[in-house]
Image (tube, coloured by chain):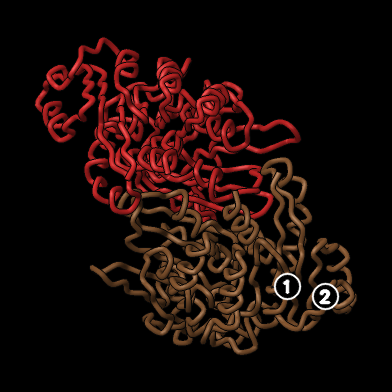
Chain colours: A brown, B red
């Protein structure tokens, strides 16, 4: 039986879903993997920090936060900030789930670095770390014989990175094609039923899928960041979001969507990346998708990626209706893959 | 640098594709995995056997077989049969690709057992071994600290078994839904264009997809065997093909197919398996698939599987246009996963 001390930094929807998943899977990890764990540190954005070497009572922490309390009462020692939490936690594994800064990837990158200095494995759902510092963090992790895993940064918990890492040895990724942004998918679907772009966008905002400032989604930035993360890791070419040829969906009119529908096609905001010799070209743009494509039937938050390799032809993965629970699973899988 | 001695038993389309893939990937395995190999034994169905401790010249063997020669001239020692080959090969890894016997799984099962006795890892594309002896072979392999891998037994080289083994730790498979038989898929597609069942079947036979006796495909036996293999491994419940509720496509008429088309639906021969308490129920039967399903657009030999787990909702894999090359990749992946 191996025991691991876990630190959860970031306790939004994903962090809380991870805490709940850990509770739910506790007995299974013990019986199937000979793994036990205690959560020795939790850091929140606005409710403070708790470090408890004996292990926190996760259910009590979740309840306290739901009741609007802070974490101070749970902490064995005073904790001033996230860095202080990492230093004092004594954890074996850090789950880094603080909010993403798309410009710099900070402070998440520094959190991850500090965790390696203290000998921890790191699992993160924070895309900024991969886009801005993947190769540096991988190399720091290797120096400490630790793992830097980030399954949940793209397509939630679907096993994209671990697929290539462990299930497809000897395969070379030549190109991929994907639909990775659900807001634009929802807007385009609503426009098929006759709504204008603005109406469809307001609907997406009302149900909480689109942000108040929707430009990250509708101008293709979110998709570009995901392409950058995938290319950086899976094709081993650092590519920045700004280097991606990017067209959003603002120019798509209801008439275009209706005409496409009449031809049996649908618009999707399609991400592509292709090797050309030593370089990789990334692109995001609206494309007409025919009914024969598995992209055609895509609804809601469902995402799809089609990998072209030198050994398997085309391999497609579809993740249906993901949410914070599936993102949390990606983090759990990273943990198990790092330690087993 | 680690060196491995490989034995290839069975040298039909898949065995030859594996030999060609090994040649093509030789330099990559050396530079990316620090792995070198030599093929020390090859066994064919009708062209004899060769054991060569110094390593066979693969290109020369392929050419000799293409020119109608036997393998005797390549062998350093006399070899009487497959068992003799395994005993004398001195190999570290056996690739078992002899023809499948659906009734008994033999002699492939005995080949695999003998390989374990001689301390080899085994990779096989032979479904009979999994359906008839999976748990026994797994346990024998474990006793010898060797691996028994079989990625290519279902969906060619697509990473189905390795996905659950290595990329989805802690996930429980609750059910799956799949289209795994290409002959029936082709026949149903042709019937949509107005052909009768018999006409469509004759076409499938002409292009070499369907067997002279097509009952294995059209009565759902091939699909049932694949369901049995998947349930046995991924749900850890030994299930025999005869235990699967099985309906083929003979009762589907052109009128039914046309009516479905008029409603925007297509018939597919769908495989399902579902946990019910401690048991698993398997079923293969024609189903009407709507346009919103990724099964709808399926053409040719493309296959699809939709996994329902307790942690990811639904995860779908599609393998486009597989062939002997992709089956060969599954065998190569097994080898790398066994030794790295």
- Tell me the subunit letter for badge 2: A
Up/down of A339 relative to B276, above or below: below
Q: Residues within 10 Å of mark 1 (few under 14, many from 20)?
A: some
Q: Secondary structure at mark 1?
A: helix
Q: Is residue B276 left or right of residue A316?
A: right
To the question of a shared chain for discs 2 and 1, the answer is yes
x and y, in percent, of residue A331 in the image = 63, 61
Quadrant hosting residue B288: top right
- Tell me the subunit letter for badge 1: A
Between B244 and A326, which is closer to the camera in this rendering?
A326
x and y, in percent, of residue A149 in the image = 54, 63
Up/down of A235 relative to B150, above or below: below
Up/down of A223 relative to B111, above or below: below
Can residue A189 be seen at all in this image of the molecule?
A: no
Between A214 and A72, which is closer to the camera in this rendering?
A72
Give the CA separation, mark 2 to mark 1. 8 Å
x and y, in percent, of residue A317 in the image = 49, 56
x and y, in percent, of residue B299 in the image = 39, 48
Quadrant hosting residue B9: top left
Seen at 30% across and 32% down, the residue is B5
Numbered-mark total: 2
Seen at 47% across and 15% down, the residue is B104
Image marks 2 and 1: residues in contact by CB distance under 8 Å: yes
Q: Residues within 10 Å of mark 2 (few under 14, many from 20)?
A: some
Seen at 74% across and 57% down, the residue is A22
Seen at 62% across and 53% down, the residue is A336
Determine which residue is flagged by label 1: A88
Between B182 and A261, which is closer to the camera in this rendering?
B182
Determine which residue is flagged by label 2: A77
Q: Which numbered disc flags the more N-terminal residue, 2 or 1?
A: 2
Can residue A147 be seen at all in this image of the molecule?
A: yes
Q: Secondary structure at mark 2?
A: loop
């Amino acid at each position: 039986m191996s025991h691991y001390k876990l630190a959860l930094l970031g306790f939004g929807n994903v962090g809380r879903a991870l805490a709940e998943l850990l509770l739910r899977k506790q007995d299974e990890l013990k019986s199937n993997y000979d793994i036990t764990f205690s959560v020795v540190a939790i850091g929140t954005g606005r409710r403070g920090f708790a470090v408890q070497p004996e292990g926190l009572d996760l259910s009590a922490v979740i309840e306290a936060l739901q009741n609007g309390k802070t974490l101070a009462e749970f902490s064995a020692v005073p904790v001033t900030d996230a860095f202080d939490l990492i230093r004092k936690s004594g954890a074996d594994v850090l789950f880094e789930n603080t909010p993403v800064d798309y410009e710099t990837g900070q402070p998440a990158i520094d959190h991850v670095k500090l965790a390696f200095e203290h000998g921890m494995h790191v699992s993160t759902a924070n895309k900024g770390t991969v886009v801005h510092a993947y190769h540096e963090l991988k190399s720091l992790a290797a120096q400490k014989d630790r793992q830097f895993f980030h399954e949940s940064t793209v397509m939630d918990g679907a096993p994209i990175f671990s697929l290539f890492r462990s299930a497809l040895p000897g395969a070379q990724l030549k190109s991929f094609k994907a639909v990775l942004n659900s807001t634009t998918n929802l807007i385009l679907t609503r426009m098929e039923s006759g709504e204008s772009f603005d109406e469809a966008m307001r609907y997406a905002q009302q149900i909480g899928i689109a942000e108040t400032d929707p430009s990250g989604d509708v101008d293709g930035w979110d998709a570009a960041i995901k392409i950058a993360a995938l290319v950086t890791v899976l094709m081993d070419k650092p590519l920045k979001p700004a280097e991606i040829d990017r067209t959003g969906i603002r120019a798509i009119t209801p008439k275009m969507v209706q005409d496409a529908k009449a031809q049996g096609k649908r618009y999707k905001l399609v991400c592509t990346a292709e090797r050309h010799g030593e370089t990789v070209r990334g692109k995001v743009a609206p494309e007409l998708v025919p009914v024969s494509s598995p992209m055609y039937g895509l609804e809601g938050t469902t995402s799809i990626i089609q990998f072209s390799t030198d050994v398997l032809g085309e391999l497609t993965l579809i993740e249906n209706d993901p949410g914070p629970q599936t993102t949390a699973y990606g983090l759990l899988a990273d943990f198990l893959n790092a330690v087993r």
